[in-house]
Image (tube, rainbow, N blue to C red):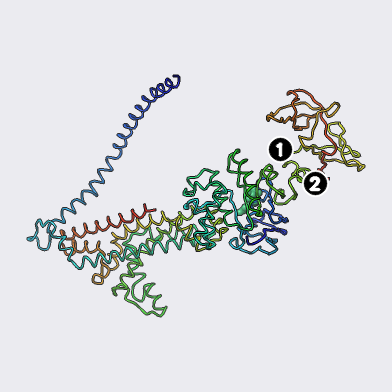
């Protein structure tokens, strides 16, 4: 009997409180919505609307060089695109560029972080110097490399190549070397980012588990493979995702260094879309290319996020 | 087991810059022994254990295991297992993977590993938790996991750095008893670091008492309890620890607050001493040392009295039913064989 009374009393006193909580939560939600609205509208205006407009444009033939042919064409741009060899080449260049720059950034960044974490002195200085390329504008980086680093005979890289007995190379004129160069430039600029993220993550790992692993007779390599790498995995995956998104849509550095050349050797999909739209003035087809890039980006990020969740 | 687990420390010194964490430490551990390193916090116990494990190198001196000089041998090659105070479990591995790790490093066949992991987990009663990650375990369960990881490999030496200090009081007592049984059944040499004298007293076959980077006494718990080497050890061991009272020694007697007490010493002469007697060695008697009862701590089966003897504070343990009231004046004495004499300047036993 007594218990029944207590229970019902408990429920009775609980009900108004949860009601009150609901009202409070509702008010809070409304306030949050009010705060969010301006930013949300700005976002709509600057990203969603242009995006929809891009998709809309891609359904038209809009050729500024031949305006008399303009008009609605539906999916024709996409049909053309699928049999456009230059599109497939640029997609391949994009994938090679993205894959190699991201892999290099992670590998070099991780190697540097592993080296620096054991440095007793000068770690702070190293971090400051390492971060410099990241704060430069990619266009500036492109200019620096084209003039100071890769210029024939006087550029540092060419100078070193000559002294190493390789002879002067046409770094930006040879299709393969040009590709290598733009990959090197992107890697040079963005490896410090991976380095900083991985260094911070590495510094947060507890030291005692490494001592335990030593006593458990794990070699340095086993400690790296079985402990460091799994514990860094979230950070590495995060770096890969962020850098992949950026590499897929890279533009300024390549544009200033090779402009996609020689020929189409370094023409990533993004650059092809730009050239089509603003050099050849086929706005409609350029828009279709940009949409294709968007789809590729979404697919790849989807795969990466799925990988992140796995295990 | 690849060795006996016999350890000897020869004049081990460890400097941190100018600061000497260890000032020349010597001890021998016999195979199969449960050896405790006891001492207050900061006295150099962990440093000693880490040097034995090979995690730190000594500044000077030699470490021998099974008569082989291992001073410059890497921790990997010493065949030593250790339970860290922080447990140091691999956070990304399950309990089973944690326990299996040392065996995988030793390249044992998979089937053998699985059965050894179950065996070790069963011994410390965590075989139902094998699929959990360390983050999903309670402190006591983490401690057991660390223990299982250490015993699974059957190393020749088993080191424990304050393994019970992160457990609550009840669990600490339970685990303490289990630990002792486990060590006995494994027959392995164990080195056990603790700042808790009760732990060392109950667990150890022998113990080394550390005071500020030096070992002040080595012996069985009973020996150290019965004949502490110095004032510092006397004041550290026992609960509550020994009463230490400055007094005057005159021809075989000591004079405390004007009262003469017989000792077992017969040397003639007069000098200043520090007199030690355990709280449990005091008796109430007629015509003894007069003392006022300041405070009574009742522990149920016994009581500890804080006594005031003419300004000197003395603690006394009473276990029979006749406990005086606070504020009462009583008269106490102790037997000659229960009196310890120390030199007030060298602080050593006389
Ligand atoms: N890396 C270090 N640098 C300077 N002093 C240290 C270092 N490690 C330990 N010490 C000092 O050495 C002394 C002994 O430490 P430790 O062996 O950890 O004591 P404990 O007996 O509590 O385990 C302490 O005073 C500690 O401050
Ligand atoms: Mg310690």
Residue B48 visible in image: no
Query: Residue A180: image x %, image y %?
Result: 33, 70
Whether B285 is drawn above or below A173: the answer is above
- The residue indicated by pointer 1 is B239
Q: With respect to residue A181, does A118 lie above or below?
A: above
Left or right: B259 with respect to A199? Answer: right
Locate residue A195, reporting x and y percent: 43, 59
Q: Residue furthest right?
A: B268
Q: Which residue is mark 2?
A: B348
Q: Residue at x 50, y 59 (%)?
A: B111
Q: Residue at x 62, y 51 (%)?
A: B160
Which structural element holds mark 2? loop
Q: Are discs 2 and 1 both within one chain?
A: yes
The image quarter containing residue B306 is top right
Q: Secondary structure at mark 1?
A: loop
Residue at 42% over, 61% down: A109
Name the subunit of mark 1: B
């Amino acid at each position: 009997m007594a218990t029944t009374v207590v229970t019902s009393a408990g429920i009775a006193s609980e009900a108004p409180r949860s009601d009150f909580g609901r009202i409070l939560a509702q008010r809070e939600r409304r306030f949050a919505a009010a705060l969010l609205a301006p930013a949300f509208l700005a976002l709509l205006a600057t990203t969603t609307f242009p995006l929809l407009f891009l998709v809309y444009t891609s359904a038209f033939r809009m050729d500024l060089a031949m305006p008399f042919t303009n008009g609605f064409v539906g999916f024709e741009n996409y049909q053309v695109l699928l049999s456009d060899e230059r599109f497939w080449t640029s997609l391949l260049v994009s994938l090679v560029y993205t894959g190699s720059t991201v892999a290099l950034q992670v590998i070099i960044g991780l190697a540097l972080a592993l080296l620096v974490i054991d440095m007793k002195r000068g770690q702070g200085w190293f971090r400051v110097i390492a971060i410099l390329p990241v704060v430069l504008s990619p266009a500036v980086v492109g200019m620096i490399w084209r003039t100071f680093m890769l210029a024939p005979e006087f550029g540092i890289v060419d100078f070193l190549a000559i002294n190493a007995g390789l002879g002067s190379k046409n770094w930006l004129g040879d299709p393969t070397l040009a590709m290598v160069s733009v990959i090197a430039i992107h890697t040079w600029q963005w490896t410090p980012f991976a380095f900083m993220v991985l260094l911070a993550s590495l510094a947060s790992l507890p030291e005692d588990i490494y001592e335990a692993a030593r006593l458990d007779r794990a070699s340095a390599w086993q400690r790296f493979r079985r402990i460091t790498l799994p514990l860094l995995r979230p950070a590495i995956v995060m770096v890969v995702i962020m850098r992949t998104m950026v590499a897929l849509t890279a533009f300024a550095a390549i544009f200033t260094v090779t402009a996609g050349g020689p020929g189409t050797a370094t023409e990533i999909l993004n650059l092809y879309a730009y050239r089509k739209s603003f050099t050849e003035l086929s706005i409609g087809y350029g828009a279709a290319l940009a949409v294709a890039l968007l789809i590729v980006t979404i697919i790849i990020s989807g795969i990466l996020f799925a990988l992140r969740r796995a295990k | 087991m690849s060795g006996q687990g016999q350890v000897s420390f020869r004049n081990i010194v460890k400097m941190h810059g100018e600061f000497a964490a260890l000032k020349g430490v010597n001890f021998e551990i016999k195979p199969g022994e449960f050896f405790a390193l006891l001492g207050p916090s900061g006295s150099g116990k962990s440093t000693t254990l880490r040097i034995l494990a090979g995690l730190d190198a000594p500044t000077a001196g030699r470490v021998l295991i099974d008569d082989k000089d291992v001073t410059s041998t890497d921790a990997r090659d010493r065949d030593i297992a250790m339970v860290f105070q922080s447990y140091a479990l691999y956070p990304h591995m399950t309990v089973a993977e944690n326990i299996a790790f040392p065996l995988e490093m030793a390249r044992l066949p998979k089937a053998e590993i699985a059965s050894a992991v179950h065996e070790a987990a069963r011994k410390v009663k965590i075989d139902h938790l094998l699929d959990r990650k360390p983050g999903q375990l309670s402190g006591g369960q983490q401690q057991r996991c660390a223990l299982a990881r250490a015993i699974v490999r059957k190393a020749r030496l088993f080191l424990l750095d304050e393994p019970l200090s992160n457990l609550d009081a009840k669990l600490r007592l339970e685990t303490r008893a289990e630990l002792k049984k486990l060590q006995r059944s494994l027959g392995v040499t164990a080195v056990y670091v603790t700042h808790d004298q009760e732990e060392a007293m109950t667990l150890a076959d022998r113990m080394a008492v550390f005071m500020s980077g030096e070992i002040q006494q080595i012996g069985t718990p009973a020996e150290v309890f019965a004949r502490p080497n110095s004032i510092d050890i006397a004041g550290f061991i026992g609960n509550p620890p020994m009463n230490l009272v400055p007094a005057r020694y005159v021809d075989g007697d000591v004079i405390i607050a004007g009262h003469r007490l017989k000792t077992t010493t017969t040397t003639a002469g007069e000098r200043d001493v520090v007199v030690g007697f355990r709280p449990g060695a005091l008796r109430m008697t007629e015509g003894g040392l007069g003392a006022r009862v300041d405070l009574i701590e009742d522990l149920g089966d016994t009581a500890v009295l804080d006594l005031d003897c003419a300004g000197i504070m003395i603690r006394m343990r009473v276990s029979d039913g006749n406990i005086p009231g606070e504020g009462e004046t009583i008269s106490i004495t102790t037997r000659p064989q229960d009196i310890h004499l120390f030199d007030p300047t060298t602080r050593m036993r006389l």
